[in-house]
Amino acid sequence: MLLTFKQLLTPEELARARALLLAPEAEWHEGARSAGSQAVAHKHNRQLAPNSPGTDELQALILGALRRDALLFSAALPKKIFNPLFNRYGGDSNHYGAHIDGAVLHSQRPDQWVRTDLSCTVFLADPDSYDGGELHIQDTLGPQRVKLAAGDAVLYPGHHLHEVTPVTRGERLASFFWIESMVRGDEQRRLLFDMDMALLALRQRHGESEETVRLSGTYHRLLRLWAST
């Protein structure tokens, strides 16, 4: 299931994130430093250093936006969230070849292991400000090329083959992280999300009714059956 989320960040949050990332004191290193053995040869970008000034504020900003987005919560049903990271593509560090993320990764803040059920990218640069830089995902419905407005996000299964195509003009800025879901299976998460969206539409059209209450009960019975907390 691949989903996009419009304006995950407010204009004020986006401006603040960009100011911190582009500040002279921001520390960037070669992204290959944090790549696993399978991906290291394919990763050609720069990544914000973990202890760079402003990192705590940037991570809090992204996590706050995630927690208030009800649609993203319904789709992901998060149990753990990997500490958000930040990267930039441009110049000689301009692409990330096709790879699959590790199944379990260590998150520094907090100190925990996270199963990468879902991958999320939050775009932080205006798409008109750079050429290339599409997130190319091999989805179950076929190849998907994603290049969203600044402040928008995309969520997709962590086991999908994906790449960032070369940036040939300008600079691409983004945050990326992984989510361990309470519901491990993709198909179960999709069924729950579809049911939740149908319930929302029914309530908006007909209000709370006996039928929506019963369907809501079925949703929560399934969630109770499949969720691990």
Image (spheres, rainbow, N blue to C red):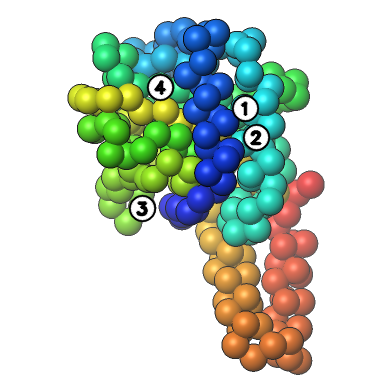
**Which type of secondary structure does the marked residue at label 3 adopt?**
loop
Amino acid type at circle 1 is Leu
Name above or below for residue 161 compared with residue 223.
above
Q: Nearer the viewer, residue 153 or 186?
A: 153
**Which type of secondary structure does the marked residue at label 1 adopt?**
helix
Q: CA distance from mark 3 to mark 2?
A: 32 Å
Sooner in the amino-acid sequence: mark 3 or mark 2: 2
Sooner in the amino-acid sequence: mark 4 or mark 3: 4
- Residue at coordinates 30% horizontally, 19% vertically from top-left? 90
Q: Dot 1: within a 10 Å radius of its alpha carbon, few (fewer than 14), some, or many (20 or more) residues? A: many
- Residue at coordinates 51% horizontally, 50% vertically from top-left? 7
Q: Would residue 225 be seen by someone viewing this image from the given angle?
A: yes
Q: CA distance from mark 2 to mark 1?
A: 5 Å
Q: Dot 4: within a 10 Å radius of its alpha carbon, few (fewer than 14), some, or many (20 or more) residues? A: many
Horizontal and vertical percent position of residue 16:
57, 31
Sooner in the amino-acid sequence: mark 1 or mark 4: 1
Tag shown at residue 140: 3
Q: Label 1 belongs to which residue?
A: 58
Horizontal and vertical percent position of residue 108:
69, 19
Q: CA distance from mark 4 to mark 2?
A: 18 Å
Q: Would residue 178 be seen by someone viewing this image from the given angle?
A: no
Tag shown at residue 61: 2
Q: Label 4 belongs to which residue?
A: 88
Amino acid type at circle 3 is Thr
User: Mark 2 and 1 residues: CB-CB less than 8 Å, in contact?
Assistant: yes
Amino acid type at circle 2 is Leu
Foreground tag (4 vs 3): 4
Q: CA distance from mark 1 to mark 4?
A: 15 Å
